[in-house]
Image (cartoon, helix red, strand yellow):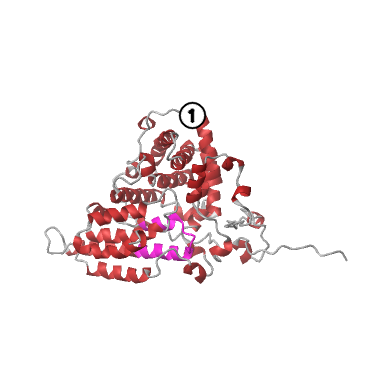
C-alpha cells in the first residue's frame, strides 16, 4: 500500500460549506457555492508569513514612499473567517438595515434634492476635458487599491472590485462614479504632491458627468431594469460626500454639523428612491453589501469572543440607558407654547425616541461585528431620522446635539477609513462650540471616547 496522501486541515472555509459539511476550496466564490447557486461569503484569511517586501506587487513597489505610508494607514486589516465568527447569509430573509415603507417619510417635494449639493454639470467641474490616459490610471488604481479600502470584508471588496465595474460597462454614469472615487482617493494619497490638484479636478469632472445622466434616470421612477446600477452609483455618492475636506484641499470640514446633516439627508433620499427594490438585494450579486451591514440576520451563532473585541466603549449600554432617561425627561415644545398642540408635542418626542431606537440597532450591529465594523453599520442610523430631527440639528437644538454627540462614538469606530478620518472628532468639536452651557455635561462621555479627554 502506498503512502497516504497528505491532507491540509483548515478552518477558514466559507460558512455555507461549513453549514453543509462540505470541503471548501477557500476561493471567492468557492466552487461549492457556484455549483449550488448559493451566495458565497468567504473571507480570505490573512497570510502573516510573508514580509511586506516579498508580498508587494510591482505596481506597489513603484509607488512613492509617501503614498505607501498613507496607503498603509488607510487599508483596514483583513480578518480570517474564524475571526469573523460563525454566520451564514439568509437570502430569503428581510434586510433589517432597510426600513419598511411606513418607516420612511417622503418629506421632500422632489427626489432630486439629495444630490443638489453636488456639481450639476461637467462645466461646473472646472472645465476639465476627458483624458483617457488619466482615466486608465484611475481605473487601474481603483481595481488594485481603492476598492480594497472601502470595506474590510473580502466578499464586499469583490462587489466593489468586480461587480460595480461590470455595471459600469453598460452604464457610463456608474463608470464615471468609479473614476471619481479613484481620483479623490489619489488626491488623498498625494496630498503633499503637485499632482493632487489634477486628481481633484478629475474627480469633480467624473462625478459631475455621472450625475448628469443619473439625474435624468431618477427623474422617472426607478424600475426593475435599472435599479442595480442606480444603487451602485448611489453607494458611490455616499462615499464621495464624505470626502469634502479632501476635495476642498483643507484639513477640516468647513461646517461639520451642517456637512454631516447634508450627508444624512442624502442617505435618506437615496434610501427613499431605492426602497422598493432593496428587499431584493440579497438575491443579486450585490448581496454582500446587505450581508455586511445586517449581521444579526446572517449570524447563526453569536460569538462572545467577537463582542469582547468590540470597538465600542464597555459602558455604552449604560450610557444609552442614561440617554433614554434624558429624552424621557426633556421638555419638548410644551403644549402651552403658542402654535404647538399636544399632538405635535407628542410627535416631537417620538422623533427622538425613534432616533434612539435605531441608535440601539446600530450599536447592536457594531457589537456583533467585533473589530470588523463596516461603515454601513454606523450610517444605517441616518435612515429613519425625521425631518423634524434634521431641522433641530440645523437649529442647534440641545437635545438633537446631545444625540448627535453620542452618534460620534459610533462614527469613531470607522475612523480608520480614509474618507471618514477625523469626521467624528470634528463633528464633536463643532457640537462643543454650539452646545448651550447647561447641556455640556452630556458631552463628557462622548468626548472621553472620541477626543480622549
Quadrant (top left, top right, bottom left, bottom right) of the N terminus: bottom right
Q: Is residue 324 above or below residue 223?
A: below
Residue at which label 1 appears: 131
For the residue pair 215 and 27, the one nearer the viewer reads as 27
Q: Does residue 373 belong to the magenta stretch?
A: yes
Residue at horizontal 41 percent and vertical 37 percent from the top: 207
Residue 166, percent from left and from top:
55, 42
**Which of the 4 image quarters holds residue 366?**
bottom left
Q: x, y (%) of residue 383? A: 36, 55
Total numbered labels: 1
- Label 1: element kind: loop
Q: Which residues are magenta?
A: 357-381
Tell me the quarter of the image containing the C terminus. Answer: bottom left
Residue name at image x 39 percent, y 57 percent: 412
Residue 435 in sight: yes
Q: Is residue 345 left or right of residue 88?
A: left
Q: Is residue 216 above or below residue 371?
A: above
What residue appears at the point 51 percent right and 37 percent down from the top-left corner? 138
Q: Residue 248 at x, y = what percent?
A: 35, 39
In this view of the protein, can residue 99 be seen by the observer? no
Q: Residues within 10 Å of mark 1 (few under 14, many from 20)?
A: few
Q: Main secondary structure of the magenta part?
A: helix
**Residue drawn where x is 36% and y is 52% of the image:** 423
Amino acid at each position: 500500500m502506498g503512502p497516504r496522501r497528505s491532507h491540509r486541515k483548515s478552518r477558514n472555509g466559507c460558512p455555507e460549506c461549513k453549514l453543509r459539511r462540505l470541503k471548501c476550496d477557500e476561493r471567492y466564490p468557492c466552487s461549492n457555492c457556484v455549483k449550488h447557486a448559493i451566495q458565497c461569503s468567504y473571507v480570505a484569511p490573512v497570510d502573516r508569513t510573508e514580509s511586506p517586501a516579498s508580498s508587494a506587487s510591482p505596481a506597489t513597489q513603484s509607488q512613492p514612499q509617501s503614498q505607501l505610508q498613507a496607503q498603509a494607514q488607510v487599508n483596514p486589516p483583513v480578518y480570517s473567517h474564524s475571526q469573523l465568527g460563525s454566520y451564514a447569509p439568509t437570502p430569503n430573509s428581510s434586510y433589517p438595515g432597510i426600513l419598511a415603507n411606513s418607516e420612511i417619510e417622503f418629506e421632500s417635494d422632489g427626489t432630486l434634492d439629495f444630490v443638489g449639493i453636488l456639481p450639476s454639470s461637467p462645466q461646473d467641474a472646472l472645465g476639465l476635458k476627458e483624458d483617457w490616459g488619466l482615466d486608465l490610471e484611475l481605473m487601474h488604481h481603483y481595481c488594485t487599491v481603492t476598492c480594497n479600502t472601502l470595506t474590510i470584508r473580502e466578499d464586499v471588496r469583490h462587489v466593489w472590485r468586480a461587480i460595480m465595474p461590470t455595471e459600469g460597462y453598460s452604464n457610463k454614469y456608474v463608470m464615471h462614479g468609479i473614476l471619481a472615487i479613484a481620483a479623490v482617493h489619489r488626491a488623498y494619497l498625494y496630498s503633499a504632491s503637485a499632482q493632487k490638484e489634477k486628481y481633484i479636478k478629475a474627480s469633480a469632472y467624473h462625478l459631475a458627468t455621472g450625475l448628469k445622466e443619473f439625474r435624468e434616470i431618477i427623474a422617472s421612477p426607478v424600475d426593475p431594469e435599472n435599479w442595480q446600477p442606480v444603487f451602485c452609483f448611489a453607494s458611490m455618492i455616499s462615499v464621495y460626500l464624505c470626502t469634502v475636506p479632501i476635495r476642498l484641499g483643507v484639513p477640516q470640514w468647513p461646517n461639520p454639523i451642517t456637512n454631516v446633516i447634508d450627508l444624512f439627508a442624502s442617505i435618506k433620499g437615496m434610501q427613499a428612491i431605492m426602497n422598493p427594490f432593496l428587499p431584493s438585494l440579497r438575491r443579486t450579486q450585490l448581496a454582500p453589501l446587505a450581508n455586511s451591514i445586517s449581521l444579526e440576520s446572517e449570524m447563526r451563532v453569536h460569538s462572545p469572543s467577537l463582542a469582547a473585541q468590540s470597538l465600542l466603549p464597555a459602558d455604552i449600554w449604560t450610557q444609552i440607558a442614561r440617554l433614554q432617561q434624558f429624552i424621557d425627561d426633556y421638555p419638548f415644545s410644551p403644549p402651552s407654547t403658542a402654535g404647538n398642540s399636544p399632538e405635535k408635542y407628542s410627535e416631537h418626542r417620538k422623533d427622538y425616541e425613534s432616533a434612539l431606537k435605531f441608535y440601539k440597532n446600530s450599536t447592536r450591529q457594531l457589537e456583533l461585528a467585533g473589530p470588523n465594523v463596516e461603515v454601513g453599520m454606523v450610517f444605517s442610523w441616518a435612515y429613519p431620522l425625521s425631518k423634524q430631527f434634521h431641522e433641530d440639528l440645523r437649529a442647534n437644538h440641545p437635545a438633537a446635539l446631545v444625540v448627535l454627540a453620542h452618534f460620534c462614538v459610533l462614527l469613531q469606530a470607522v475612523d480608520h477609513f480614509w474618507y471618514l478620518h477625523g469626521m467624528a472628532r470634528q463633528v464633536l468639536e463643532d457640537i462643543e462650540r454650539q452646545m448651550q452651557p447647561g447641556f455640556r455635561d452630556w458631552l463628557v462621555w462622548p468626548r472621553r471616547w472620541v477626543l480622549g479627554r
